Amino acid sequence: MNGDPKLYAILKELDIAFDYYEHPPVPTVKEAAIYWKDMDAAHCKNLFFRNHKGNRHYLVIIEFYCSLDIHDLEKRLKQGKLTFGSDRRLQEYLGLTPGSVSPFGLINDKTKHVHLFIDENLKTKEKMSFHPNINTASMVVSKNDFEKFLKHTGNTYEYIKLYD
C-alpha cells in the first residue's frame, strides 16, 4: 500500500478500519475528484496555514468542493492574519509534501503544535476520505474512527462553521 507505514501501524493499533484506493499522483482535489467517483465518503480538502508571526499553525479541513475566502476565514478563526504554511513548515510540522496534506500527518507532529479547524458540516458525515500522507492513494474512514485517530494524536481540534 502507498503511504506512510507508521500510519498503517497506528491505524492497526487503534483498530481503525479503512478502505484503500490507489490512483496516480493527484496534487489538487480537482484532479483527485476523478478517482473518487466510486468512494462513498465526504472527500476533504486539507489546507495548512500559519499565523502572521509564524508561531502557530493550523490545518483547516473542508469538503473538497468548497472554496474559502482567506479574509473570511481569518474572521471566523479569530487567529489574526493567515497565510499558507511554506513547504518547509509543512515538512517540519506534519512530515508532508505539498499535494499530500492530510490530517494523518499529525502522527509526525511530536509537539502537538498544529491545531485543526474542521468544518462543522463534516460532523454529520458518516465517512471521510484523506490521503495516507502521500497523494498516490486515498483512504476512507468513518467519522468516529477519524475522531478516535485525532484523540490518539493529542492535537487540539474543533468543529467550526467555515463557510456559508
Image (spheres, grey):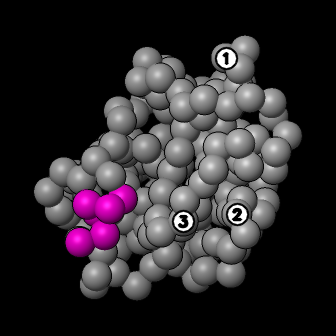
What span is in magenta? 29-34
Q: Is residue 118 above or below residue 77?
A: below
Secondary-structure class at tag 3: loop
Task: Report the residue marked by disc 3.
Answer: 66
> Which quadrant holds residue 21?
bottom left
Residue drawn where x is 43% and y is 18% of the image? 88
Residue 15 in sight here = no
The label on residue 163 is 2
Pointers 2 and 1 in contact (C-beta within 8 Å): no
Mark 3 vs mark 1: which is more N-terminal?
1
Q: Residues within 10 Å of mark 1 (few under 14, many from 20)?
A: few
Report the magenta stretch's main SS: helix
Left or right, 137 with reference to 45: left
Image coordinates of residue 139 in percent, x first then y, are 37, 65
Residue 123 in sight here = yes
> Mark 2 or 1, which is nearer the eye?
2
Question: Which corner quadrant holds the N terminus?
Answer: bottom left
The span from disc 3 to disc 1 (Cα, nearest Å) is 26 Å
Find out whether residue 30 is within the magenta segment: yes
Q: Nearer the viewer, residue 20 or 97?
A: 97
